[in-house]
Image: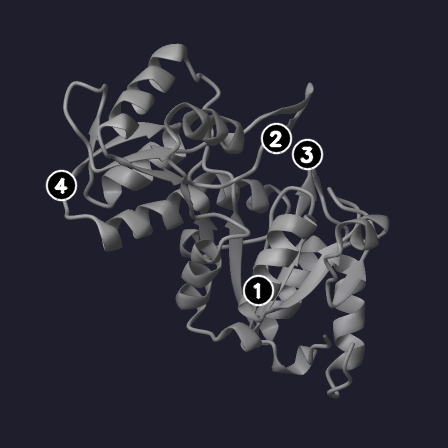
Amino acid sequence: MSADLAAVRGVLFDVDGTLWRGNTPAPGLAAFFTWLRARAIGVCIVTNNSLKPPSHYRQKLATFGVTVEEREILTSAQATAQHLARTLTPGERVYVIGEEGLLAAVQAAGMTVTPDAAMPVAAVVVGGDRCLTYAKLKAAVLLLQRGARLIGTNPDLLIPTAAGLAPETGVTLAALTAATGVKPTIIGKPARWLFEAALAQLALQPAQALMVGDRLDTDILGAKQLGMSTVLVTNGVDSAAAVADKGIYPDLMVAHLGDLLQIWRHTLAGNLF
């Protein structure tokens, strides 16, 4: 598949590994955002991480000299809350395994968050939780056995930390499914819900949008399934060598955002990459 960069009216960005690595901005980050703004190309930062609210990402980007509005940041927690608002009645009870970002988003969507399994709930909502306990798993299992649906912010099994790769949402979901047989509805990448929420926010069709990310099986696969153009940044999770191994082929591979900016500048005449 090829894509016409001149037709792109909005860009979806993954975060860690794409916009930055740890506390180091990607080469060309500030220049790329300045260039996009000058051409009125929309921006939406999309992340599977449900731990932090949008303000966290806005503040981090500000330290790199990039100004974004919170409305331009969409986490899997926010997309999950939107899904709950569409599929449940306001005020319905839900049980949440997760942290600040997810709890705040679910409550803002009008759901009633219950602390235990004392009363039935419409859904068990699972995100990343660095304080996961047996008690939380037990409550979730009991509620799922009583008919609650299972909703996961994302399917990621591992998340990078300073100590190495640590368990993420997908591990908790796997445990709950193993215990109850209930399969989750996944909201984050590569499922369509997060992408569709971002496209709606940008008021664009998939063919008008470009996904830039560093993970083949989430960023690239999910975007391609919706018909979006894709760019793999190869200095993050997946290298160029991983493309053939995983059988997921982006439209373009670059080392970092500075390279993508240079290519885009040279293809505005309508050349395809």
- The tag on residue 158 is 2
What is the distance, in whole Å, between disc 3 and disc 2 at their CAs?
A: 16 Å
Q: Which of marks 4 and 2 is nearer the N terminus?
A: 4
Secondary structure beneath dot 2 equals: strand
Q: Which of 66 and 206 is in front in this view?
A: 206
Q: Which of marks 1 and 3 is nearer the N terminus?
A: 3
Q: In this view, does 163 lie to the left or right of 209?
A: right
Q: Mark 3 points at which residue?
A: 22
- The vertical placement of 33 against 26, above or below, is below
Residue 268, how many percent across, how many down? 73, 82
- The vertical placement of 17 against 141, above or below, is below
| Mark 3 Cα shell of 10 Å, populated few (<14), some (14-19), many (≥20) | few
What is the distance, in whole Å, between disc 1 and disc 3 at their CAs?
A: 29 Å
Residue 184: image quadrant is top left
Quarter of the N terminus within the rendering: bottom right
Residue under the image location 47 percent in, 30 percent down: 128
- The tag on residue 91 is 4
Q: In this view, does 15 lie to the left or right of 4?
A: left
Discs 1/4, front: 1
Q: Which of marks 1 and 4 is nearer the N terminus?
A: 4
Kind of residue at disc 4: Gly
Secondary structure beneath dot 1 equals: helix
- The tag on residue 106 is none
Discs 1/2, front: 1
Q: Which of 273 and 217 is in front in this view?
A: 217
Residue 91, how many percent across, how many down? 13, 41
